Amino acid sequence: MAEPAGSGVRLTRNTLSMLGARTLMALAGLVSLPVVYQHLGPREFGVWVLLSGLLAMAAVLDLGFGSALVREVAAAGEDTDPVTVRRLLGLGLAWGVLLGLLVLGALAAGWPWISHLLRLGDLTRDAWHATLWLVLGVVAGGVEVPWRAVLEGVQRYSALAAVTGATAVLGAVLAITAVRLGGGLVALAACTATTGVLRTALLAATAEHRHRHLAPRPGRLSRRDLRRVTGYGLRVQVSSGAGAMNVEFDRLVVGGFFGPTVAGAVDLGVRLLNLLRLPPGFALLVLFPAAVRRTVTGGRAWLDAFYLTAVRHLTLFLAPAAAALMVSADPLVRLWLGHPVPWAAATIAVLAPAYALNLVTGAATIVARVEGRPGLETRYVLLSVLLNLALTVPLLVLVGPLGVPLATALGIVLATGYFVVHFHRATARPLRPTLRTLWPPVAAATGAGLATAALAGLLPDGPGRLGAGLAVAARATLTLALTAVPLTLCGYLRADERTRLRSLAGAARAAVVPVGGRR
């Protein structure tokens, strides 16, 4: 079957729509979190962070159905029995409900121990009521999985983006309203659960309306189908679950050792850092089902070319972005919250390069999953978690709360290096072309970051959000410029890429100069 002529246009539209939705979600968080932090206070906000992290860890125990069902729907063709696909989607729906009940039972049984471990103190009662609302959100998220898989699998990302973006904005409005009216943890959790339920209902209605033939339904499945989906899903589950452990485990450890206030500060840094992950993370999400379909017609040759192209684009974006975030961490936090939060800035500086390296390997992850070999990533993710666990306590003792994100960063870097080598050996792909693609942007961004850090004292800065914004603009612009110069001189950047950089530089000057003039 020939590839549709408009597939490139559709892929671009899908990427932009999902990026737009996630941009809305990021902006909603950037606007709402400072308000929530201000009204709850550092300690109660820290408790909120710990509860959210605890439930987020439970929510990832979806047996990998999310990715497995997307793959089933994306690979479905004229020869695929739609009844089987619908029954597989029904299985995912049933597990989502069961998971919520299991989480509720586990939390109820272990709540006295959990409240003591997280140092909830006089907030224990409110925290429990908030947890009940958050469990409802977990159930809604589980029920959402098959409906989301339908929309992702058939690449209806515009509808998915519209629902997720709109509900994110609604959730931010509800959260701001709740805390400004004097609501605490329970009101905030109720807003979160309400938003989750509404999002699930809208996604289900959209998928049912557009693709009724793929609506989930109960039914008996053959052992072969069960083995295929659960085998693939469980391997993805190990990877995604272990990845979530690296993020959420940090919050819980910091909260257990240093209390909710420090945990909340560290979480603020992680949330800002997630801006780095927004564009490449969702480009990878959109590329996965598209790569499954294109590989059917293009074969191994197309997949190999896709891999190197994806590595190039990811590295060109992530290497300078990580360097800019590191040198701008302190003013970036001041710009967001209106005052410095040292633990948040330190967390950004420590984790940014590790997150960037991990995201670059997302191209290899897509290739492995397209080829039906998600187990290739399982070892390195598990290794990352084990290294994190082994390094956390020694580094925590040596450097305090900063040792927790530092252990995570070291675990990610060492495990990612292992994965890159293992992936190329297992798939019989040469490593040298990948390294040739990687090293110029990484070297240029590293040098640019060091130079900008050395010159930071000479760059504009000042009190308040205006001074912080000027500092962020100056440091980020200098870092990006110093990265682009050697890449241009050595011929790494193509002509079209140089043109786009000149356009971005002009836009940056137009944004910075008026601010400097007013200052």
Image: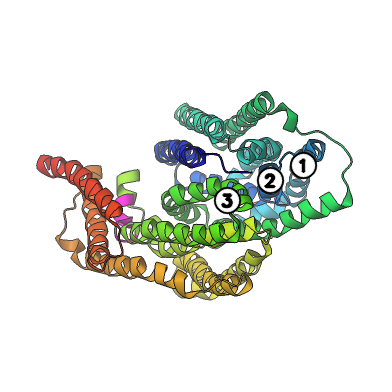
**Residue range of the region highlighted in magenta in the rendering:** 326-332
Compute the Cα span from label 2 to label 3. Answer: 10 Å
From the top left corner, tell me how far across and down residue 34 is, in percent. Answer: 40, 40
Residue at 66% x, 49% y: name it. Answer: 67
Residue at image location 59% in from the left, 61% down from the top: 300
Is residue 166 visible in the rendered structure shown here?
yes
Q: Write down the residue under mark 2.
A: 75
- The label shown at residue 291 is 3
Mark 3 falls on what kind of element?
helix
**Image mark for residue 80:** 1
Q: Three-letter amino acid code at disc 3?
A: Ala
Which sits earlier in the primary sequence, circle 1 or circle 3?
1
Which of 44 and 64 lies nearest the eye of the viewer? 64
Choose between 242 and 210: the one closer to the eye.
210
Q: Amino acid at mark 1?
A: Thr
Q: Position of residue 269 (x, y in %)?
A: 42, 53
Q: Is residue 190 left or right of residue 173?
A: right
